[in-house]
Amino acid sequence: MRQGFLYQNPSVLWFLAALGLFTVSVVMLSEVTGVAVVSTSFVKTLGKTLCLCLVAIAMDVVWGYCGILSLGHFAFFGIGGYAIGMWLMYARTEMIVLGSLEGQVIPPTPQEVSDAIGNQIFGVVGSSEFPLIWAFADSLFLQLLMVVLVPGLLALVFGWLAFRSRVTGVYLSILTQAMTLALSLYLFQNDSGLRGNNGLSGLQNIPGFEATSQAAISVVFFVASAVALGAGYVFFAWVVSGKMGSVIKGIRDNEARVRFLGYHVESYKLFVFTITAVVSGLAGALYYPQAGIINPGEIAPIASIYLAVWVAIGGRGRLYGAVIGAAFVSLLSSWFTGGGAPDIPLGFYTIQWTDWWLVLLGVSFVAVTLFFPKGIGGLFDYLVRKP
Amino acid sequence: MAMLLEVSGVSVSFDGFRAINNLSINFAEPELRAIIGPNGAGKTTFMDIVTGKTKPDEGTVIWGERNISLLGMSESQIAMEGIGRKFQKPTVFEAQTVRQNLALALHNPRGPFAVLTHRRTAKNAARIEAIADEIGLTGSLTRTAGELSHGQKQWLEIGMLLAQEPRLLLVDEPAAGMTVEEREKTTDILRRAAKTRAVVVVEHDMEFVRRLGCKVTVLHEGSVLAEGSLDHVTSNQTVIDVYLGRAHA
């Protein structure tokens, strides 16, 4: 069956080949092999970009294939990041605390250790108590489970309430924006238990690998991100092919017809919404250890809108389009906003790209929507002749 | 002849306007029936009620041998009970092929996990071939539905309904926008379908109804005005006054 699936979807093989080639090239050129053409910080940027590509294909499945314009999928991405960040921060702080308490005449009690860790983590928000949500933070396994469960359950409950009431179109988009805004505002509070606007930091330091160089860690995360993207791509390509793809594309194009054919449309929407939320969470869990820091600003409503912009520019309704859009726009964005693009002096005014990039992005978005609805990915249609 | 669907005493109002007013109507199995009536007579609202899209304010809708009530069931549950509905405007999935459209409609488990793990079978393929043959689209199976002509889309939608294997087929203005030959073919498809199931056709076009050659129900202001053969109802003075008279004026 797998053979048949790949045979029917040759683009999946092309994508995997390109991704594999890219991954091997970057690793060969990284500082780990000594070639060092690609710097460690750029390996991290590329690794993060792959995670953004993964959340973009999830967005493409929910929007481009199923027609649900969710403007809240970055919230799931952020939750995944927070979930893994809690373990990273806890385990590392525990190690530091144990190190500093070592050699004392009276061995510290578990309570003292716990208080010291709490003090270290929550000192910035004037607290030392562990909130309830940190109950599993000492276990990597349980926190990894949270990476999947929390976004999944949130999407399940939110989606169930929204789809059951037949909220569709722009109303659903607004509702998802409200969800991510509410979550972000909540996390900004100091008593949310996740360090308020400080967020979680030091996530690039992996507990137990203090002796390992960041160059090596960055390559490991880069490869892991590439594997996750490849696996996510194959998984979603499988979901949207065959009969499931037929049903969800039918829902996108004519929901009522699907309903009168006897399909319970709400279940399908919920299914798509939830699996894409889980994948978004996984992408976030791989992204933030590479970014090193997560704070509530990451899941501000604008982040989810960017996600939709990437998918639109890349070409929705085709998975590689989402990948191209996310990679292209996010890399371009960091080039423009990171001072990479030279300012344009006009004599009377100087265009500084840090300010004007958003204008350029907005104009491109409008232009693509109006003139190239198929996006960048649509260019491939010219390459592949129809049989 | 046992009744397949019994609608009795059904009323529904929208913002004070009584779209359906104490409507009672029954269908047997098999049966071919035409429903005619002027605009606003409640034909589409009647279909909405039977298929679960609209909940009536009062009355009962009883289905099948087990006499179950369709009120309170969702659209998809009603569809799975065996009621298929064709919309006025042809609604097929234009981005997908004719084969995919038919495969989607085939009578198979409808749950997300059954669909996700669905495998193509020879039985399903044969079924699709048979339906394509019935609606005259055998040569178009691999074409995208969006490329089909208006008439072909109408047939495809009827084919999708047949694939659902319904016991009751509600067909809203199947002949709208069709050429004479296309109409004839549509009549044939519907007449054949009605040999084994109940087919209810809502139609404006008198010629088309005449060609169907079946029992006719005239709706007016949300209730049944007259019922019988086309000749019988068209000779009814009230029918002439409210409908035919106006149309011929």
Image (cartoon, coloured by chain):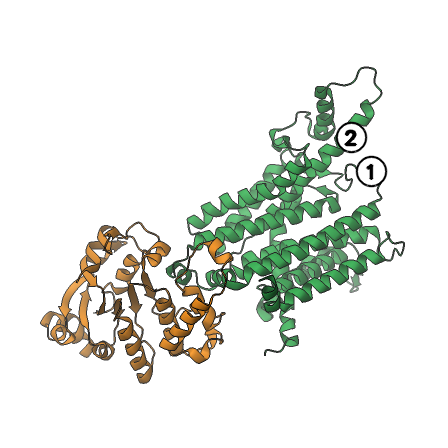
Position of B207 compared to A195: left or right?
left
Dot 2 amino acid type: Met
Identified at 82% across, 38% down, the residue is A210
Q: Are marks 1 and 2 in contact (CB under 8 Å)?
A: yes
Residue A275 image point, x, y percent: 56, 50
Picture coordinates of residue A301 (x, y %)?
60, 48
Pointer 1 and pointer 2 on the same chain? yes
Q: Residues within 10 Å of mark 1 (few under 14, many from 20)?
A: few
Asked if one can make out residue B64 in the rendered structure from this viewpoint, the answer is yes
**Kind of residue sitting beneath label 1:** Glu
Q: Which residue is mark 1?
A: A210
User: Label 1 to label 2, Cα distance in Å?
Assistant: 10 Å
Q: Which chain is orange?
A: B
Q: Is residue A283 left or right of residue A70?
A: right
Q: Colour of chain A?
A: green
Is A210 displayed left or right of B12 in the figure?
A: right
Q: Secondary structure at mark 1?
A: loop
Which quarter shows the C terminus of chain B?
bottom left
Q: Is residue A351 visible?
A: no
Q: Identify the image quadrant of the N terminus of chain B.
A: bottom left
Q: Numbered disc 1: what chain?
A: A
